[in-house]
Image (cartoon, grey):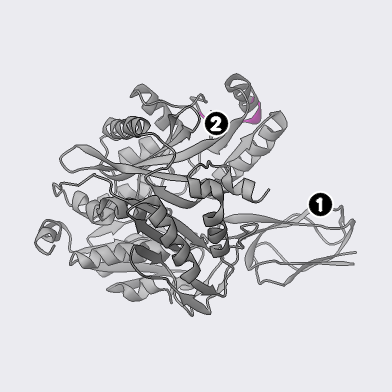
Amino acid sequence: MVERSKGVQHVFDSVLVANRGEIARRIIRTVQRMGLRAVAVYSEADADLPFVKEADEAILLGPANPAQSYLDAGRVLEAARESGARAIHPGYGFFSENAGFARAVIEAGLVWIGPSPEAIERMGDKINARNLMEAAGVPVAAGTREPVTDLEKAVAAAAEIGYPVMVKAAGGGGGIGMGVARDEAGLAKAFETASRAAARFGSAGGDASGGQAAGPAILLERYIERARHVEVQILGLADGTVVALGERDCSVQRRHQKVVEESPSPGISPELRERMLAAAVRAGETVGYLGAGTVECLVDADKQDFVFLEMNTRLQVEHPVTELVTGVDLVEQQLRIAAGEKTVVPTAVTGHAIEFRVYAEDPKRFFPGPGKIDIWEEPSGEGVRVDSGYAAGNAVTPFYDPLMAKLCVYGRTRSEALARAREAVAGFRIEGPKNNLPFCSELLDRIEFVNGDYDTGLVARMRA
Amino acid sequence: MAEVRAEMVANVWKVLVSEGDSVEDGDTLVILESMKMEIPVIAEDDGVVAQLKVAEGDVIQEGDLIAVIE
């Protein structure tokens, strides 16, 4: 392992992790294992979190408000100068899909650990990405080919596509502001929600100055009932080739946000898997993709067919399930690729992995439940991996997303993974903030989930 | 008289009513934001906003009084 780190060491000896919580901690772990120096940046609200303590150096960015800390580009770059960090890893969220920030990093003479700003831009706009994929021969859902900027145009587009339609911000991410409209009245509401989300939560493809185009850019697509959300992990290697590392099924969702992911997907045939992996590789090749990326697709479970949804030009929250079934450390690959090292990546998938996102939220309505953590006891044992951002004594604050930890299990078979998951969920003790561990237990007793026969409507049915 | 209290720690994102306004059951009084989620706070009775205890930008704790509807 020490021998293999040499290539990276010659290009950069230190990495600033421009993120927080569990993902900052997880990235820091790999950076240090590779013999590199890890620099954390943090806000006042996060000063006591483990990622700050575990980094080799930690620099305070500013107040809790993300705009004055994690999303203050100038301040993050200043922290890089102060600490002498030679590379920046953005994690997910925040600057991870911000082409303007990526450019600023490169212009500052630092290594950007991610795809090129051009690739981020081309994929960050969902409409542009969709058109690009269609031209590359990747199947896409019927939908708008240009940004829809007012309700009148949305109504006309929906009539053409046919209801139900999915309404989302063209530059959005993470499911925020997405909604299904079944008729014109529903469309007005969904359009309003998506427009507001576009304006408020920033856009994946936006520039570093935070500038927004005049009016919302909304995308409408045909909504597939009984759909599974299945995504393919790709890696664009330094030699220009693109490889696929299996898929992840992310169909367990609440408010269009993922709660549980697993690999392999229990809902696709080997033939469909082969087609999806090939399409994902083609998608990556089309944009000359470098580094880790994810091609998200919607699968029609009944027809065993798929359409391209979007491409995420970053590390995903749920990347550990892929790591567990392939044995590949995706963060290590990101660093090596960014350093220009020509790596050989094993792509074979063995066994089964499931990830449960442990959120600070009530397990019935999934409403946020921040608070101070009195007790925090993680499960351990064979086939159990916990990526967490907190420890006992920390506070989960309302300023950031509710993800506290990711409980991941691995088994030789899906049923072995499920058995380990039941034990691990029962063995995870959190007291203080509300948390969704009871929901995870409930899910593990739900016959559709146990059988692997579920779709994105599962959580809603559990709460109907 | 009905007291409307916060169900969680949150930031007050938008205040949609003023003291003295008439509101109906189901009207949104304020919109809170916590953990990247907007949470509308709804009037559960018809009445008049007798007191309004929050302003946009405030950070409120679970159980804090938001408004009194009479």
The front one of A436 and A152 is A436
Give the quarter of the figure containing the N terminus of chain A: bottom left
- Say above or below: B43 vs A227: below
Residue at x-position 49% and y-position 33%:
A301
The residues bearing labels 1 and 2 have C-alpha atoms spaced at a distance of: 32 Å
- Say above or below: A173 vs A403: above
**In the image, what residue type sits under mark 1?**
Gly
SS assignment at label 2? loop
Question: Is the residue marked by circle 2 packed among few (<14), some (14-19), or many (20+) residues within 10 Å?
Answer: some
| Residue A378 seen in render | yes
| Residue A78 seen in render | no
Residue at x-position 19% and y-position 37%:
A241
Q: Which residues are magenta?
A: A147-152
Quickly name the residue at label 1: B26
Chain that bears disc 1: B
Question: Is the residue marked by circle 1 packed among few (<14), some (14-19), or many (20+) residues within 10 Å?
Answer: few
Q: Quadrant of residue A377?
A: bottom left
Quickly name the residue at label 2: A224
Residue A389 picture location, percent across and down:
42, 68
SS assignment at label 1? loop
Question: On the picture, is A299 further left or further right than A187?
Answer: left
Mainly helix, strand or loop, the magenta region?
loop
The front one of B9 and A318 is A318
Residue A211 picture location, percent across and down:
48, 45
**In the image, what residue type sits under mark 2?**
Ile
Residue A456 picture location, percent across and down:
54, 42
